[in-house]
Amino acid sequence: MQTRLRETALRLVLSTAICLSFGALRPAHAADNLPAPSPADAGPAIDGFRTAKFGMNEVQLRNAIISDLKVSASAITKTENQLQRTTVLSVQVPDLVPQGGTATVSYFLGYQTHRLIQVNIIWSPEIDPKTTPMMLYQDGESLQQYFASEDFPANRSTGNIATPNGILLFRATDSTGNAVLLILSGSMTKNQKDNTTALSPTTLTLAYAADALHPDVFQLPRGSF
């Protein structure tokens, strides 16, 4: 029971952090300030994860999860994100990346629309104790190479960016403002001798978001306080 509670808490904390990261990372990259690409160079569409498409309602989403991940209906856990006031459907999936450990895949239904707005996929020893730092590095590299080969326009993608607690391995937006984000995070250790910093990864997060700069989550209205 305690393990299940820790896993739920981890999903909620990380989901909030990743949702905020999509917007927080934007000002640091001039790519997002450039004009929208023409249809000829728009690149791939980011419309969800596998057959779970942004805009699906809960019934459609559950059917997509069962079909995509080959799980039973009872394997899907439903929770509420109290901060964002979104509904979250989660399932644990072994070897989503071959030999990459068990991941938790979480699907977020919007606060107002109650339709799919975001998908987070998380690998961590908190989810699968057999997950090692090397596995996280390898999974991250495999996914980074995968997205790098997807032909996102240079003005819509970036990667290998240091963050306060890890590395932004990849980030891209499509012509509609949907985004994909891949982050390897953990604890940073500084070597005083050569002034270098090393990352000991504890979490790999892959997230897809619809209209990343205007998420359908609860926010206090401007001027209300």
Image: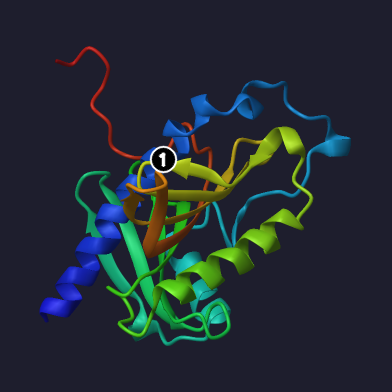
Q: Which corner quadrant of the image does residue 177 belong to?
A: top right
Instruction: State the quadrant of the C terminus.
Output: top left
Residue 203 spot, x, y in % from top left: 37, 63
Q: Can residue 110 be seen in this view?
A: no
Question: In screen coordinates, is 1 left or right of 147?
Answer: left
Q: Closer to the camera, 83 or 141? A: 141
**Depth order, front residue of 132/70:** 132
The answer to whether 208 is drawn above or below residue 177 in the figure is below
The residue drawn where x is 35% and y is 77% is: 76
Q: Residues within 10 Å of mark 1 (few under 14, many from 20)?
A: some
Q: What residue type is labelled 1?
A: Ser
Specify the quadrant that holds the N terminus. Answer: bottom left
Residue bearing the label numbered 1 = 21
Q: Residue furthest front?
A: 193
The colour scheme used to paint the residues is rainbow
In this orientation, does residue 64 appear?
yes
Residue found farthest to the right: 40
- Secondary element type, mark 1: helix
User: x, y percentage for residue 205?
Assistant: 44, 59
Tally of numbered tags: 1
Instruction: Report the residue at 25% width, 46% height from top.
Output: 85
Give the side of residue 52 with respect to residue 166, left or right: right
- Residue at the far top: name it: 223
- The percent coordinates of residue 197 (x first, y second) are 40, 49
| Above or below, comparing residue 25 to residue 134 in the picture | above
- The x and y percentages for residue 127 are 31, 75
Residue visible at 15% across and 71% down in the picture: 5
